[in-house]
Image (cartoon, rainbow, N blue to C red):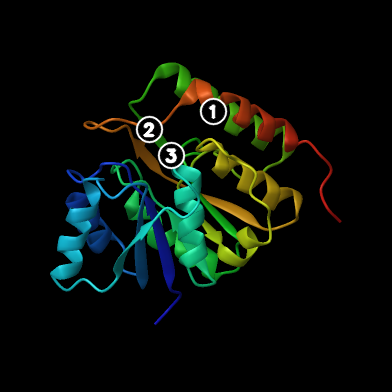
Amino acid sequence: MGTHMTVVIPAYNEGAKFPALWSEMCSYIRSSFSAIMVYDFDEDNTVPVVKDIIAAGEQRLTLAKNQHGTGVVGAILTGFDIATDGAVLVLMADLSDDLAQVDRMLALYADGWHVVAGSRYMEGGRLIGGPFFKQLLSRMGGTSLFLLRGLPTHDATNAFKIYDRAMVRSFTVESKGGFEFSLELTVKAFLAGYSITEVPSTWHDRTSGQSRFRFWKWLPGYLHWYFYAFRSKSR
């Protein structure tokens, strides 16, 4: 049967894209998986789309309302609360992530790695579209942590990662804003001595809909966890 994986999908009004996302998941992911779509409010237009897929007989997909307030951090934490121990993949609902790499990532998790990162900035990785300044800072942050601190991924800020659920549950998650959450978890895993690896992945900027990424609002959080990475590792 192989290693089972839980996919956590935080969504905010992604009803127009979710059928294509689900189709790609079913096409690309050959491993055993179940998925949790987490939403903030009942009027989210992703909810009826997911309900229709479930009503059509899809047993791998479930809905969950954010139990940690609102926002992407709370949504992801809600998914981790529901997931069983083992591999948990964080996946965006906007078709930006490289689903062709998921089986490879899960195989590495099964080999014993605690964090498996999809990496846009290692050899073979690509980033297509998106604001130039955001790209620049993300690339500089990821590659400098790799080169200067020895973090075992070029892309610590990327949300597209498989995490070991028990490892994540051993941390106190402090992020409140948004996607600095992924940097926090990667840095804490590194400092605690957990094993981290990466695979090259391609990231596509969304072509429709509204991004919930708030770069300037979340920048202080990113900077906090960036410098936190230079603390001494646990023995």
- For the C terminus, the quadrant is bottom right
Residue occupying image coordinates x 50% and y 35%: 121
User: Residue at image x 75%, y 56%?
Assistant: 193
Q: Residue 161, can we see it?
A: no
- Residue at position x 60%, y 31% from top? 143
Q: On the picture, is 15 further left or further right than 229?
A: left
Q: CA distance from mark 3 to mark 2?
A: 24 Å
Q: Horizontal and vertical percent for residue 87?
A: 50, 66
- Residues at marks 1 and 2 touching, judged by CB atoms closer than 8 Å: no
Where in the figure is residue 114, as x and y percent of width and height? 61, 61
* Residue that lies at the very extreme toward the bottom in this rendered image: 1
Q: Is residue 72 visible?
A: yes
Where disc 3 sits, the SS reads loop
Mark before the other along the chain sequence, 1 or 2: 2
Mark 3: give few (<14), some (14-19) or many (20+) Cα within 10 Å.
Answer: some
**Amino acid type, label 2:** Arg
Q: Could you tell me how far apart the alpha carbons at marks 1 and 2 are, in whole angstroms? A: 11 Å
Q: Which residue is mark 2?
A: 212
Q: Residues within 10 Å of mark 2 (few under 14, many from 20)?
A: few
Q: Which residue is mark 1?
A: 218
Percent of width and height locating residue 74? 49, 48
Q: Which residue is mark 3?
A: 125
Q: What amino acid type should be assigned to the residue bearing mark 1?
A: Trp
Task: Give the label, 3 or 2, closer to the camera.
Answer: 2
Amino acid marked by disc 3: Gly
Q: Residue furthest top?
A: 133
SS of the residue under disc 2: loop
Residue 211 vs 90, above or below: the answer is above
Residue drawn at point x = 71 percent, y = 40 percent: 150
